[in-house]
Image (spheres, helix red, strand yellow):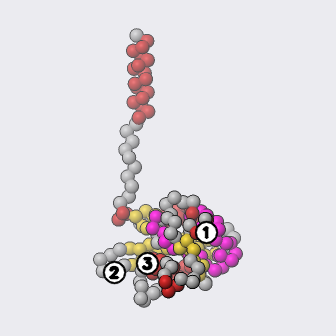
């Protein structure tokens, strides 16, 4: 009798621990907002201005959505930006990181680069550039010959034969 009751209690415990939780669904590609360009500008010692550019595919032409927020660190900025967009933001297509000249001089780029380098979603071929003025102005600028800023900046920073003597740095190069 004791064996039967122990078996019965064990079976009930095992069944109660299993649960009926289904697998977490990942959002489909159409529901994702793939960040292509990310810019960092100086606000003060504790705050940074983070601007992101997200390509929006359409049948006629490519367009870009730009979101900006002020935060104290990159992860906080991502949370703030996620509330502004109607789609789930992802860093998996990040190709270019821009830093405003003032931010690079006063704060330095090491903390942000290290934070993004340790993020497993961010790829290793992310180009890094320091721009004169504000990164937000470069991201929000209009470029007549190339309306889609993500592709334009990625192609501009990619090493080519014409620019062989220019120094190019990726996120992977800074930590080797």
Question: Which quadrant is the C terminus positioned in?
Answer: bottom right
Bounds of the magenta span? 92-116
Callout 3: SS: helix
Q: Position of residue 139 (x, y in %)?
A: 51, 79
- The residue pinned by badge 2 equals 61
- The residue pinned by badge 3 equals 151
Mark 2 or mark 1, which has the lower sequence index?
A: 2
User: Alpha-carbon distance for marks 1 and 3?
Assistant: 23 Å
Q: Is residue 93 magenta?
A: yes
Question: Neighbour class for label 1 at 10 Å: few (<14), some, many (≥20)?
Answer: few
User: Alpha-carbon distance for marks 2 and 3?
Assistant: 13 Å
User: Going 42% across and 80% down the picture, which residue do you hit?
Assistant: 148
Q: Is residue 38 magenta?
A: no
Q: Position of residue 112 (x, y in %)?
A: 61, 67
Mark 1 or mark 3, which has the lower sequence index?
A: 3
Q: Is residue 171 above or below residue 28?
A: below
Q: In this view, does 16 lie above or below 100?
A: above
User: Which is more foreground, mark 2 or mark 3?
Assistant: 3
């Amino acid at each position: 009798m004791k064996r039967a009751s122990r078996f019965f209690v064990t079976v009930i415990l095992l069944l109660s621990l299993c649960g009926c939780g289904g697998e977490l669904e990942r959002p489909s590609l159409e529901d994702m907002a793939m960040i292509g360009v990310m810019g960092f500008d100086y606000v003060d010692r504790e705050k940074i201005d983070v601007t992101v550019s997200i390509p929006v595919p359409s049948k006629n032409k490519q367009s870009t959505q730009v979101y900006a927020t002020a935060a104290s660190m990159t992860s906080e900025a991502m949370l703030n930006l996620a509330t502004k967009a109607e789609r789930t933001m992802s860093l998996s297509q990040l190709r270019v990181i821009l830093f405003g000249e003032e931010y690079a001089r006063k704060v330095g780029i090491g903390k942000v680069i290290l934070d993004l380098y340790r993020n497993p979603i961010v790829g290793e071929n992310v180009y890094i550039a320091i721009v004169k003025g504000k990164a937000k102005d470069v991201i929000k600028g209009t470029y007549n010959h190339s309306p889609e800023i993500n592709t334009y900046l990625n192609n501009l920073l990619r090493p080519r034969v014409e620019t062989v003597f220019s120094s190019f740095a990726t996120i992977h190069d800074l930590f080797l």
